[in-house]
Image (spheres, rainbow, N blue to C red):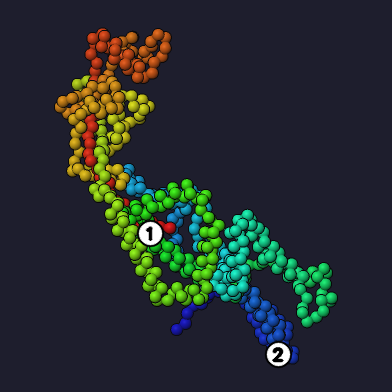
Amino acid sequence: MSKDNSGSIANSDTPIPVVQIHPADGSGPRTPDPEHGSHRLSASKLKDKLQSLGDDMSRESTSRMGDRMINLLLAQVLPSEDHSSNSSSDGSYNASPQVKDRRSRTYVERPNFSIPTMSSNFRRFNSRIGVAFVFQNRLIRLFTWKQPTQTLSFLFMYTFVCIDPYLLPVLPLACCLFFVMVPAFLTRHPPPPTSYPTDLYPIGGPPLADAPTIKPAPEFSKDFFRNMRDLQNCMEDFSRGHDAVLQFLTPLTNFSNENLSSLLYIILLLVSCSLFLVSHLLPWRFIFLMLGWSATAMGHPAISELLSSPENSALISDAENEGRSFLLTASKKDIELQTSNETREVEIFELQHRALHDQSGEYEPFIFSSSPYSPLSPARISGDRPRGAPFFEDVLPPRGWRWSDKKWTLDLLSREWVEDRCVTGVEVEIEGERWVTDLHYEVLDDGERGTKVHRKGKSMDVGEQEREVLRRTWESGRPSRKGEWRRRRWVRMVERVGSGGVGTV
């Protein structure tokens, strides 16, 4: 079976270069064949050319391979969606409340997440994080008493600082001198070897080496993989410490047991208030001195082995359990909490409308609004239409609450809520359906509707105009007409409900 491979080569009209290997002794033809476009190279030259080409390709391929490897790794474990914004896709009127995310781009403008940027930043970070791990290893050796003389020297320095806290600003300067500048000077001016006379190595001579510079670790070098190993272990240590702290503190402080958390809150509040009064009387130098010596001594191998023995571990566990039991018993005895849900009364106003010129027409249902849309309300004066829901079923309870009553109840005390809100220019029904209807007054000056009323040469605001028209209408004996809006108040009980949310870090 044969296949048509005519389309496999794009430039089929150009000659294809052919590399031929000939012996180094010169036997055989050496002139290039113009018909076939071949180039003849010796074996040694071809070997050198292929080696140089291979080195260049290996460097490029290594970098590209590293980029692809890290990109594929991040693509598997990280989502590709952008979760940096807090915008909600739910456009409903009464959506559930959202928890504020202080890491969102709403608060701080930062670049969005992308896998290539994450890969590049990770490689740059991993190449430069080695100094932090060197410092971490030195601290571990210091506090685990690998060299007791160094640990004791640290304790003596810590003692001096605790006795005289004014020495604390000297520490960063001394660390810069002895741990940064002295090693750099010794690199340029190395000390003389002990096997030769010192006269041959004058200290005041010219520098014998270049100034030390800190360079990032090359990618896929031994130091680069060591940094990745240390970063892996550091992440595991942080995860364990984070989980241990949350396991110990969360049950005490998250009010899952409200009696226990309330008792702990009261204790912390009393201690805080007491420290405000007696903090200046406490021997803080001695306290920090004892804490530092105790924490450092616990890292000694002998003491660590003694504390990790089964007897001491059981003793510490029993003491912890007794402490928690004491707090639980005290919280149940002394703390009383309200078990019933909090209830409130919510209101809604049923608004009906009819045209002002249609005196014989009936009022038609318009909307259920949270405001009564009174004649002197800001929305009414500015000409805004009332806002709300067209049906009772569309009215939702407030966020974090639920209905405790089965249905809405008409407020029969219509005069009371009108007087509480100081609503004027309305007619109140104290019997029947309890409608509160707008009143429309005729302007008596010139018969033109909308003319301003003046008193003693001064212009009056809308409220004064309303009261003046009402007074003059009453004195003239002319009745007023009902306005275009009427409303009545409905009430319903709600109770608070728990959110049941889980916090994230």
Q: Give the image location of residue 142, x and y in percent.
A: 58, 70
Circle 1 Cα neighbour tier, 10 Å, few/some/many (<14 / 14–19 / ≥20) = few
- From what the image shows, is residue 293 above or below residue 282? below
Looking at the image, is mark 1 or mark 2 earlier in the sequence? 2
- The residue indicated by pointer 2 is 23
Q: Name the mark nearer the viewer: 1 or 2.
A: 1
Q: Based on the displayed image, in which of its 4 quarters is residue 157 positioned?
A: bottom right
Quarter the C terminus occupies: bottom left
Q: Is residue 78 left or right of 326 when viewed as pictured? A: right
SS for callout 1: helix
- The residue indicated by pointer 1 is 250
Q: Is residue 353 visible?
A: no
Q: Is residue 5 visible?
A: yes
User: What residue is rendered at 39% in x and 75% in y?
Assistant: 311
User: What residue is rendered at 47% in x and 79% in y?
Assistant: 3
Q: Give the image location of residue 443, x and y in percent.
A: 31, 13
Furthest-right residue in view?
A: 199
Q: Is residue 491 left or right of 376 when viewed as pictured? A: left
Quarter the N terminus occupies: bottom left
Q: Nearer the viewer, residue 26 or 137?
A: 137
- From what the image shows, is residue 68 above or below residue 32? above
- From what the image shows, is residue 49 above or below residue 249? below
Q: Nearer the viewer, residue 404 or 154?
A: 154
Circle 2 Cα neighbour tier, 10 Å, few/some/many (<14 / 14–19 / ≥20) = few
Q: Based on the displayed image, in which of its 4 quarters is residue 185 positioned?
A: bottom right
Q: Is residue 350 left or right of 151 when viewed as pictured? A: left
Residue type, numbered disc 2: Pro
Q: Based on the displayed image, in which of its 4 quarters is residue 220 positioned?
A: bottom right
Q: Give the image location of residue 400, x and y in percent.
A: 30, 47
